[in-house]
Image: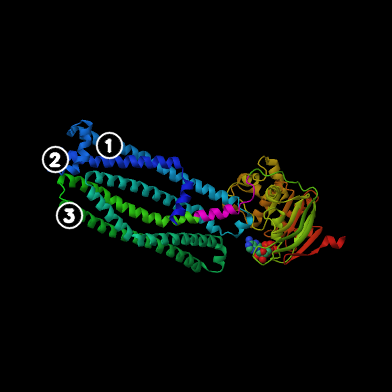
Amino acid sequence: MNREILSILLQLVDRRRVAIICALAMVGALTEGLGFILLVPLLALLVGSADDADDSLLSPVTSFFEELGWQPTLAGLLAIFLALVAVRSLADYIRVVLSMRQSIAIVDALRARALDALLNAEWRFLSRMRQSENRALLLAEIDRTATAVDQFAALTRIAIGLGVIFLAALAIAPPVALGGVILGGIVFYLYRGLRRRARKTGEQLSAHWRRVYGLLEENLDALRSIKSFGKEDYASDRILRAFVALREVRMRFTADNALARALLQTGAAVIAALLIWLALVPWGLSPITILPLAALSARALPQVSGLLETWHTWAHSAPAVLAADSLIRDAEAASETGAGTPPLSPLLTKALQFRDVSLSHRKGIATLQDIDLDLRAGEMVALVGPSGAGKSTLADIAGGLIAPDSGQVLVDDVRLDGDMRRAWRRRVAYVDQAPSLFDGTVRENLLWALPEADDATLRNVLQRAAASFVLDLPGGIDCPLGEGGRQLSGGERQRVVLARALLKKPSLLILDEATSALDSVSEAAVAEAISDLAGQQTILIIGHRGALTDLAPRTVTIDAGRIVADSRDRQE
Ligand SMILES: Nc1ncnc2c1ncn2[C@@H]1O[C@H](COP(=O)(O)OP(=O)(O)OP(=O)(O)O)[C@@H](O)[C@H]1O
């Protein structure tokens, strides 16, 4: 799994920047290591003589200066110390800033890729996807991916630091350095069970986050029903239970982490005691050698503990990298063909034709079967039929939102395939029973359809959609509508969305139960506006019987995915 995660992360990082960060970590670690090595001549100088020291062990350090022809002095050694600390501090500062930029860049790139993948995915894929998954992806999983990246960077830095400490120890006393590495390796091996557990809790955490997002979204959207059914306690119980489950996983992780730290501290103390005993008794090293080694081990122990703790957190956050990557890959695999500039779509001056069109939303169950249908340009057609008959699916195909599994859809004899389907979508306006507005003013919402529209045009279109009421709102056309247009009633929202659709001057206007939330007076006003469009635009009206469907001279009836009646056939 780690290899897969690493390859994902490697694709995300800027390799040049990573190389610089690693080089800076190396500079920091080397200057620190050199500082420790310098302790040997410094101590020898302070004690007054290095005679007591084991010459064979001290030689790598002291002979270096001798080769340079320099007899170490206190002032000289302290000056080198200061220079090393200054270089190290500067390297650390630049590394921290670059690492932060790297991690932010990864999160930004991943979020942009996820958004791009979601927004460009096929509607069929998106409509099947749980929105809570998208939310978890865009928020929690990507943030945890950033944690994984940070942990990985920390792991690399600590590994480099420990490597250099090992080299410094090797320069001072090789047997002690090798003994430390062997014993440390044994502790790391013994720790593998806890690392495995951390990875598992990480995977569970992803699943729990998704569940929490899903429940929150579902219940916040259903507040009205929850209240009317008196299910407040039930809803809060379900949500709180999901949070409790999430909390349990997080607590398990923290407890495991604390256990790992406790075991490690004990293990490290045992290693340190063992090494000191080995160095002093069987190997008989001098105190001048032991003191720098003790300083090195004092520096190495927190690093080892940091390494394991970081590894633990990495194992815990790394599954988010896989979860985010697999969701993004799924969305990218469902990408609509051709991300470039779509071609010019036909205008619908002749006809929109369905030829033998079939589609199944669920395997083995046909939603639409062998649909043959012609909508002449400028025609107004009502599509009626029982609930679940396939009306909205047919409208989605007509509007270019989804492609049929088999058969063809043609506009003015041009097949709606690939890029052409995307292009055609721009000529279609859609008003459905759950109209969506955005958190902005009426004007901003309307200008989506025609950015250059002036006030007079906006007023005209609002009036035609029986939506002039917005002019009486505080601020009139510049009145903010709140999140999702929530400051308007369902019927008011429907009329503003209709005004936006009319402003687009679409080749095909699809009204899918577009007056379901309107009272009879408003519905009659909208019906009048629609009847004024007769002959100018091709209009598909979906609904059960009502003022709007009655407007259409032609009615097509669909049942169980098949066209069962067409009033035009009767007339012909
Ligand atoms: N995204 C989807 N995934 C799976 N099944 C779907 C999906 N969309 C629609 N269906 C199913 O396809 C069938 C037709 O749905 P459709 O919405 O087209 O019917 P409809 O005639 O518009 O119904 P209504 O009048 O109730 O809106 C239904 O059985 C529905 O459950």
Q: Residue at x 37, y 56 (%)?
A: 312
Mark 1 vs mark 3: which is more N-terminal?
A: 1
The residue that mark 3 highlights is 277
Q: Is mark 3 within 8 Å of ligand 1?
A: no
The x and y percentages for residue 383 are: 75, 60
The colour scheme used here is: rainbow
Residue 114 seen in the current view: yes
Residue neighbourhood size for the residue with mark 3, other residues' Cα within 10 Å, grouped as few (<14), some (14–19), many (≥20)? few
The x and y percentages for residue 37 are: 23, 41
The residue that mark 1 highlights is 84
Amino acid at the residue labelled 3: Trp
Amino acid at the residue labelled 2: Ala
Where is the N terminus found, in terms of image quarters? bottom left
Q: Nearer the viewer, mark 1 or mark 3?
A: 3
Judged from this view, the residue extending furthest toward the right is 572
**Direction from residue 307 to residue 337 in the image, left or right:** right
* Disc marking residue 50: 2
Mark 2 vs mark 3: which is more N-terminal?
A: 2
Q: Which residues are magenta?
A: 324-339
Q: Residue at x 45, y 51 (%)?
A: 6
Where is the C terminus found, in terms of image quarters? bottom right
The x and y percentages for residue 315 are: 40, 56
Q: Is residue 326 magenta?
A: yes
Judged from this view, the residue extending furthest toward the top is 69
Determine the CA span between mark 2 and mark 3: 22 Å
